[in-house]
Structures are given as structure tokens and as C-alpha cells.
Image: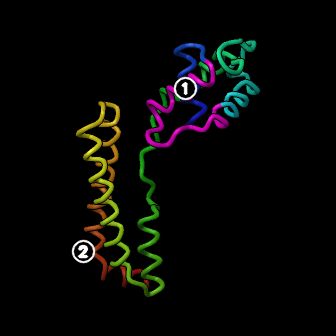
Amino acid sequence: MSVPLTLLGLLEREPSHGYDLKRVYDAFFNRGKPLPYGQVYTTLGRLARDGKVIAGEAEPGVGPERKRYVITEAGATEFETWLTEPVAPEPNLQTVLFTKVVLALMLGRDAQQYLDTQRAAHLERMHELTKLRRSGPIIDALLADHGLFHLEADLRWIELTTARMDTLAAAVRA
């Protein structure tokens, strides 16, 4: 997830204070892992330095004074370019799952035990996501579906690798 580009998109919607940007970001894009305030303001500082946002004058209010940030034309152009480009198809051909299996085989360790442990972890996460999908709002349900589909693909790969373990072990040791 690109925090700077997401903040630019939120600023294209409307000028906002850092506090408001964090609140909306956390509500929609960072489920279960809030964006630190420090990261929000550091990112806004870099965006201002690079001419993509302008920080307004400090506004008095309840609590500390706040600056309202406004997206610039350069920021809007960068956001538009990012928004219209397709995301690189994932996954890469070299994954951590694959690397661990091959290294285990190279080192004469039990790769099947690793795959069994990984399968159990995937199934537990799928259980959590299924509960979230059934009980959460539409945003959580859609994010849970996305995660479930990826986990299902990993589980299919784990089963296929298990079925081909002897062939893979021979190739790795050759």
C-alpha cells in the first residue's frame, strides 16, 4: 500500500488536516493496523517538500493548532497516473513459501513438516477471515474475500507441492 499516494487521493477529495486523513485512512485502508500519526505528518512533510501538497496556515481549534493540507496540480497528476496504472500482477515467481521448501530440501530437513505447519496457519487465518466476512461491514467483507482467495491459492500450491515432493527433492539435490 502506498501511503503517500493514498493520502494524495484523500486530499484530492477535499483539503484536510492530518488528523482527519489518518482517521479516514484507518477506517478504509489499514484494517487492524492504524497508521501512526508520525508517519502521517512525515509523509505530508515530504509531499509538501516535493510540491505535491501545500500546508495551510495553522488553524486554532480545540486542541493543538492544525494545518489544512491541499493537493497541488503536481500531486493530482501523480495521483491520477498512479490510479490509472494497473497493479503489477502478483505473486512474483519467487515466494517465501517456495524458498523455504527448497531450502529445507537442500539442507536435508523436513519440508513436509514446514508445509503442514504452513497449511495449519493458512487454515486458521481463513477461519478468522470467514468470521470477519460474515459479521463485518461490506469493506471488511470485500477485504476478507480478497485474502481468502489468496489463501486458497496458497493451499492449492501446498497440496500440489506435497504431491510432487519426491520429484522436487530430486531436482533440488541434483
Q: Give how far across and how far down residue 133 sits, in percent.
A: 27, 40
Q: Residue furthest front?
A: 62
Of residues 8 and 24, the one drawn nearer to the viewer in this rendering: 24
Label 1 Cα neighbours within 10 Å, binned few <14 / some 14-19 / many ≥20: few
Tag 1 secondary structure: helix
Amino acid at pointer 2: Ala
Magenta stretch: includes residue 29: yes
Mark 2 touching mark 1, by CB under 8 A? Answer: no
Of residues 32 and 121, the one drawn nearer to the viewer in this rendering: 32
The quadrant of the rendering that contains the C terminus is bottom left
The quarter of the picture where residue 67 lies is top right
Residue 163: mark in rendering: 2
Prevailing secondary structure of the magenta residues: helix
Of residues 155 and 121, the one drawn nearer to the viewer in this rendering: 121
Residue 157 as seen in the image, left or right of residue 47: left
Residue 42: mark in rendering: none
Q: Is residue 73 visible?
A: no
The residue depicted at 29 percent of the width and 42 percent of the height is 132
The residue depicted at 67 percent of the width and 13 percent of the height is 61
Q: Give how far across and how far down residue 78 sits, in percent.
A: 60, 25
Q: Give how far across and how far down residue 160 sits, in percent.
A: 26, 68
Circle 1 sits on which residue?
A: 81
The quarter of the picture where residue 125 lies is bottom left
- Residues rendered magenta in the picture: 17-40
Rounded to the nearest angstrom, the CA distance separating label 2 from label 1 is 44 Å
Q: Taking 81 as reference, is 150 above or below it?
A: below
Q: Earlier in the sequence, mark 2 or mark 1?
A: 1
Amino acid at pointer 1: Thr
The residue depicted at 60 percent of the width and 19 percent of the height is 76
Tag 2 secondary structure: helix
Q: Give how far across and how far down residue 92 sits, in percent.
A: 45, 55
Magenta stretch: includes residue 31: yes
